[in-house]
């Protein structure tokens, strides 16, 4: 998979690309990630990419021209262009599983007071990572990329994500490790029994219980 991220702040991605699972996925060539400063596609002398809004109002608006030039420069026949925006459909694990099958993603990060509305004519869809406002689209781009990359073949062990939260529309079951007792809090005896069939039943029941308590909306 190839992921191109259009941003005004490339340095924000340095840690993201050079640590942990994402770094290993790049080294294994499971994913290619390119961080592109779309300021380079401005034709103005000062590389300006924003301007005041027509009709007045506070803040600055990202201009459509440099963004479209950047998109068209990197777009391939396989590319899916995604605008990261609070107006988009809220992202979830099902969407991550769908996007992992794409060959090429172009993620467009906003900033300031948002995009010139005409940008919507040059993207395939909008994605929001939640009903709140961030200073820019860089953190959403990292979140979306991370959630997709970890699902790619060979990045992590398949069993690590086939039974995790949201896979079956339930939260994950409780997990424990050593010590067996900590300050009076004990590991459930069933997990020490060695009876894998009973452990499996217990875990499913705990998933249902946890989801009922914490995210009842998922059970709908």
Image (cartoon, rainbow, N blue to C red):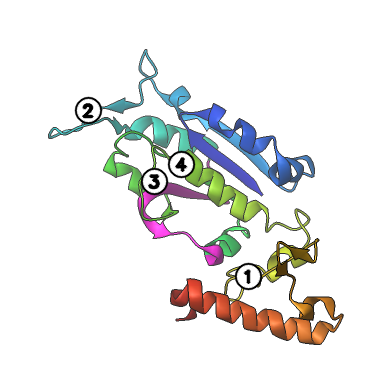
Tell me the residue at 54%/29% (across/down). 10
Nearer the N terminus, badge 3 or badge 1?
3
Nearer the N terminus, badge 4 or badge 2?
2
Query: Is 142 on the left or on the right of 31, as rendered?
Result: left
- What distance separates the C-alpha of mark 4 from that of mark 2? 20 Å
Which of pointers 1 and 4 indicates the residue nearer the eye? 1
Circle 4/circle 2 CB separation < 8 Å = no
- Residue 52's mark? 2
Residue 167 in picture, x, y percent from top left: 61, 71
Task: Decide: few, some or many residues near mark 4? Use Cα within 10 Å; few <14, some 14-19, many ≥20.
Answer: many
Query: Is 8 on the left or on the right of 48, as rendered?
Result: right
Which of pointers 3 and 1 indicates the residue nearer the eye? 1
Nearer the N terminus, badge 1 or badge 4?
4
* 60 or 21: nearer the viewer: 21
Task: Decide: few, some or many residues near mark 3? Use Cα within 10 Å; few <14, some 14-19, many ≥20.
Answer: some
Nearer the N terminus, badge 3 or badge 2?
2
Which of pointers 3 and 2 indicates the residue nearer the eye? 2
Asked if residue 90 is among those painted magenta in the image, a careful observer would answer yes
Which of pointers 4 and 3 indicates the residue nearer the eye? 4
Circle 4/circle 3 CB separation < 8 Å = no
> Helix, strand, or loop for circle 1?
loop
- Residue 172's mark? 1
Task: Decide: few, some or many residues near mark 2? Use Cα within 10 Å; few <14, some 14-19, many ≥20.
Answer: some
Name the dominant secondary structure of the magenta segment.
Answer: strand
Q: What segment is highlighted magenta in the picture?
A: 75-94
- Residue 122's mark? 3
Task: Determine the residue located farthest toward the right in the rendered image.
Answer: 194
Task: Determine the residue located farthest toward the front in the rendered image.
Answer: 184
Q: Which residue is mark 4?
A: 108
Tell me the residue at 58%/48% (across/down). 145
């Amino acid at each position: 998979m190839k992921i191109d991220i259009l941003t005004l702040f490339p340095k924000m991605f340095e840690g993201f690309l050079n640590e942990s699972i994402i770094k290993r996925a790049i080294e294994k060539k499971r994913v290619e990630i390119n961080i592109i400063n779309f300021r380079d596609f401005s034709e103005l002398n000062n590389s300006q990419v924003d301007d005041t809004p027509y009709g007045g109002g506070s803040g600055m608006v990202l201009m459509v021209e440099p963004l479209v030039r950047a998109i068209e420069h990197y777009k391939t026949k396989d590319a899916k262009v995604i605008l990261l925006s609070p107006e988009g459909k809220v992202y979830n694990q099902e969407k991550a599983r769908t996007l992992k099958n794409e060959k090429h993603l172009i993620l467009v990060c906003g900033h300031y007071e948002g995009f010139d509305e005409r940008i919507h004519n040059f993207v395939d869809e909008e994605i929001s990572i939640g009903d709140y406002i961030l200073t820019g689209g860089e953190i959403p781009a990292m979140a979306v990329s991370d959630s997709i990359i970890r699902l790619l073949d060979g990045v992590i062990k398949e069993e690590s994500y086939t039974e995790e939260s949201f896979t079956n529309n339930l939260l994950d079951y409780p997990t424990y490790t050593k010590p067996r007792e900590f300050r009076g809090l004990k590991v459930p005896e069933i997990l020490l029994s060695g009876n894998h069939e009973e452990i499996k039943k217990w875990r499913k029941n705990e998933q249902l219980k946890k989801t009922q308590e914490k995210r009842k909306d998922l059970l709908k």
